[in-house]
Structure formats: structure tokens, C-alpha cells
Amino acid sequence: MAVGLRTHIWNNNLKSLVLLAGFPILLIALAYAGAVIFIAYGGGAGYVDEALVEAAWLMPSVAPIAFVGALIWFVIAWFSHQAIIDASTGARSVSRTDEPELYNLLENLSISRGMTMPKLKIIETGALNAYASGLTEKQYTVTVTRGLMQRLDRAELEAVLAHELTHIVNRDVRLLVISVIFVGIISLVIEIMFRGMFYSSLSRSGGSRRGSGGNAGVLILIAFAVMALAWFLAIAIRFAISRKREYMADAGAVELTKDPDAMISALEKISGNHEIEKAPPEVRQMFVYDRQAGFQSLFATHPPIEKRIEALEQFAGGRRRPPGGTSIPAV
């Protein structure tokens, strides 16, 4: 288990570095698409191949801007990511005085883990969910919903808190936050570029482009393809975030609490009412559970609850609790 955990942490650290390195590369690709669009709407190249070469020649002057933009964004995100996440979910900080039982549970679990207690926050919603966030020890935060506090008993709530602490210990949190920052800014840039193309097309619908109409149309299609590829790669990052992290966090919770039944019961309750509608998709991948249906299920960041419960039954000796009762005894 220790070897597997060290490997998991090492893989998370490596993936974090890959994401950081890939961010400016995708920005450069988007900058190239922007240059192609500029040429298509009046840059002056008469042929498609000439326009593409001209756009490539612009890259040495555009690339530094992309790198500086990436650096500025990560500096802002480093200091402001928690405020951004809190604003998107409506989370607020609480103290021991505000929520003594919840605070004490998290504090005791942190002591048992031998780690500094993360900040504690609550979302005032009836949905049942929780997540951990932060990039450094001073920033780590565990957030739970009011519904989770009201519907789960003490043992179940303790299991969920232990699950989130395990995400912090395993460095899952750092990778998830970097992914949220990465995908969010790429999606925003692409949206801005699409809107710019749309409004530019409307404003020029009655005018003429310096390039021939057919060539301009081909260039716009090429730029569109580059942007679509960048968007797909940004979304596909979710595949790099292994679903195994949830199984390992469940196992870590059991290791800490010695109560697999409580983790199973908590997952069953969460599965029935977990949706926080105002939370954006990039943030929902941080939740203890997020169910995606249809086409979105191809990019699902969480394994099904049933699979997680089966793993707890098979490997942790857990048993489902009958309605209103204690866990089913082992046969």
C-alpha cells in the first residue's frame, strides 16, 4: 500500500508539471489561430499556404506574450484560486465557535494524520457533497455542504472528512486545482475568440476582406480546427486525472477511521442528492462525487458510486447498512 501510495503521489506531481508545461503551449496554439484569423480578415496574404506561413512568422513575437500571459495567470491563480472557487460555490469560512462538532472532527482527523489542519468552509445548500482545495499547506481547505452535515451521522461525516484529507495527503488536490485553472483559462480564451469571430463576421458581412473570399473562408476553418483541438485537449485533461484517486481516497478514509461501513453509507446518501447546480464543471471534478450522464460521461472524473462501494466491500470488508439499521453482518 505504501509503495502504491508513493507511486500515486509521484504520478500526481509529474502530471502537475506536465499540465504547467502544456499550458503556454496551448496558448501559443491559440495565438497562432488568432494570427490566422487576423490575416483572414485583412492581413493581406493571397493564398492559404502563404497566410499560414505568415502566421507562423508572427509566432516569435507572439510566443513571449503567451508565456508572460501564462505566468501572470498562474501568479493570479496561485493567490486567488481559493477565492475564485469559493465565489463559484458560495462557500464561507467557519470557526470552532461556529461549528464546534464539525471543526473538532476535522481537527482530530488531522492530528491522527499528523498534518496541519486545513481551513474549514461550508456551502449553504441542501445538496450532499464536499471537496478539498489548495496548492500549499497554508492554503489547504476542506469544504462541506450544509446538507451533508444535516443528513450524515457522525461516523459518516467523519468518513467524508477523512476522504478529503486523503486527497490532500495524496496530492490529488494540487493536481485538481491546476487542472481547474488550466481548463478554465483555455476555455475562456477560446470563448473570447469565438465571440470575436462571430461579431467580426457580422460587422463585415456587407464589406470585403483583403484576402479572397474563398481563401479567407479556408483560413477561418483552419483557425476553427486549431481552436477546437485546443479545447478538446483541455477537456481531455480530465482523462489524465485518474479515477483511481477516488478509490484511494475511500481507502485512505477507511484506514484513518477504521469504519468502512460508514464510508459506504455516506456514499449511498451522497449519491441521492449531490448536485450543486451553480458550481461550474471544472470545480465539480473536485467534489467527493459528481455524476455525469450522456456524452459527458465519456469525460467523467469520478467512478460510479456502485463501483466504489463494491471496492470497499471487497477490499476493506465493508457492509451496506440496511435502512435504519446497523451494517449487515459478515457471513
Image (tube, rainbow, N blue to C red):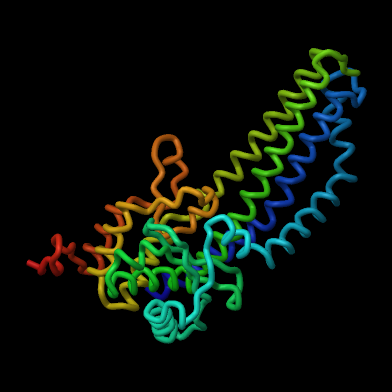
- Residue 72 or 153: which is nearer the viewer? 153
Residue 242 appears left or right of 307: right
Residue 254 vs 274, above or below: the answer is below
Q: Residue furthest left?
A: 331
Could you tell me residue 100's position as x and y percent? 41, 81
Q: Number of numbered discs present? A: 0
> In front here: 330 or 156?
156
**What residue lies at 25% left-to-right and 66% top-to-bottom?**
315
Quadrant of the snapshot with the N terminus: bottom left
Q: Is residue 57 above or below residue 247?
A: above
In the figure, is residue 140 to the left or right of 327? right
Q: Which residue is painted at 54% across and 63% down in the image?
A: 12
Query: Residue 22 appears at what percent x and percent y?
Result: 68, 52
The foreground one among 191 and 98 is 98
Residue 258 in which image quadrant:
bottom left
* Residue 288 % position (x, y): 41, 60
User: Observer-nearest residue: 39 or 292?
Assistant: 292
Asked if residue 38 is positioned above or below residue 22 in the image, the reply reads above
Image quadrant occupied by the C terminus: bottom left
Q: Quadrant of residue 134?
A: bottom right
279 horizontally vs 106: left or right: right
Residue shown at 85% from the left, 33% from the top: 55
Q: Is residue 85 left or right of residue 291?
A: right
Residue 206 % position (x, y): 83, 13
Residue at point 74%, 40% (across, down): 30
